Amino acid sequence: MRIGLFIPCYVDQFYPKAAIATLQLLEKLGLDVDFPLRQTCCGQPMANSGFEHLTGGCNELFVDNFAAFDYIVCPSGSCTLHIKQHLHSHKNEAAATAIRGKVYELVEFLTDIIKVKHLEASFPHKVGLHQSCHGQRGLHLSQMTELVAAPYSKPMQLLNMVKGINMVPLKRADECCGFGGTFCVTEEAVSVKMGKDRVEDHVVAGAEYITAADLSCLMHMEGILRRQNSPVKVIHIAQILNAAL
């Protein structure tokens, strides 16, 4: 299978190590991965702000970049969900439709498509797992605690394969961090308070690192941690799954 690596613009600009870890991890698993150099923003920020009608250029470029691949893999739940639900093309709607059915967030690709059972990874630290809203409620990477249903967590399934890792228990396992894309700008005070509450849960649990499948959430919490002069760090799940002694 040919894999197209979709790296969201904010990951490319602010967290390139997570992008590199994603590529290395996929290649370690024996996959043929290509990174289209002309890719840029998927259009989610505009759509979230009510300007989806202005994302045509982003959509057409995405189709041009990724139509030829068997699968498209992305280390961001929110960007993946945006493409799954909103990608259209005036030039080639058939290609856009096909892409919506073959784009996957990294965790769901590893668990659902290639069905990883073992990882040669080691990360001897205390880690708290943040269940990002887009991944949990949109992509169903984990069960929502308010539902009377059997619990599951695809990120935790992979993290449990990592040697030496100590996953700390949280009081509110699936609480929103408050980032919410442009919500953190339009509702700054609410966003900050939610972020502080989310961070405190991890700190009280003794986490050295907070991980997630969405770097936008981690970026929000990292800002709060830095302002608190906290030693707790954030790290994308790909960097843990790719880590070795």
Image (tube, helix red, strand yellow):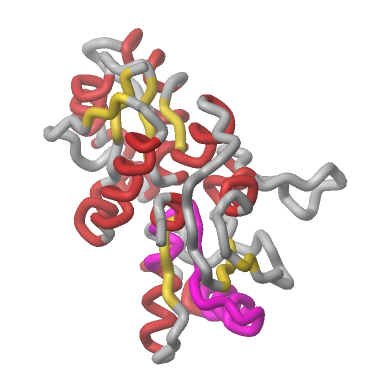
Give the answer, above or below, for where 118 lies relative to 227.
above
Q: Is residue 135 magenta?
A: no
Quick check: 136 left or right of 152?
A: left
Quick check: 58 left or right of 227?
A: left
Name the residue: 30% across, 41% down. 23
Quick check: 229 left or right of 174?
A: left
The answer to which image quadrant residue 52 occupies is: top left
Name the residue: 63% across, 53% down. 160
Name the residue: 42% across, 80% down. 224
Residue lying farthest front? 245
Give the answer, above or below, for where 166 lies relative to 102.
below
- x, y percentage for residue 193? 54, 79
Q: Main secondary structure of the magenta part?
A: helix
- x, y percentage for residue 131? 59, 56
Name the residue: 30% across, 18% down. 69
**Residue 2 visible to the viewer:** yes
**Residue 186 visible to the viewer:** no
The answer to which image quadrant residue 199 occupies is: bottom right
Between 43 and 226, the residue placed more toward the observer is 226
- x, y percentage for residue 154? 62, 43
Image quadrant where one finds the C terminus: bottom left
Residue lying farthest bottom? 229
Quick check: 37 left or right of 17?
A: left
Image quadrant where one finds the N terminus: top left
- x, y percentage for residue 153? 67, 47
Between 210 and 62, the residue placed more toward the observer is 210
Give the answer, above or below, for where 230 lies relative to 174.
below
Between 94 and 72, the residue placed more toward the observer is 72
The answer to which image quadrant residue 197 occupies is: bottom right
Query: Magenta segment, which residues?
Result: 193-219
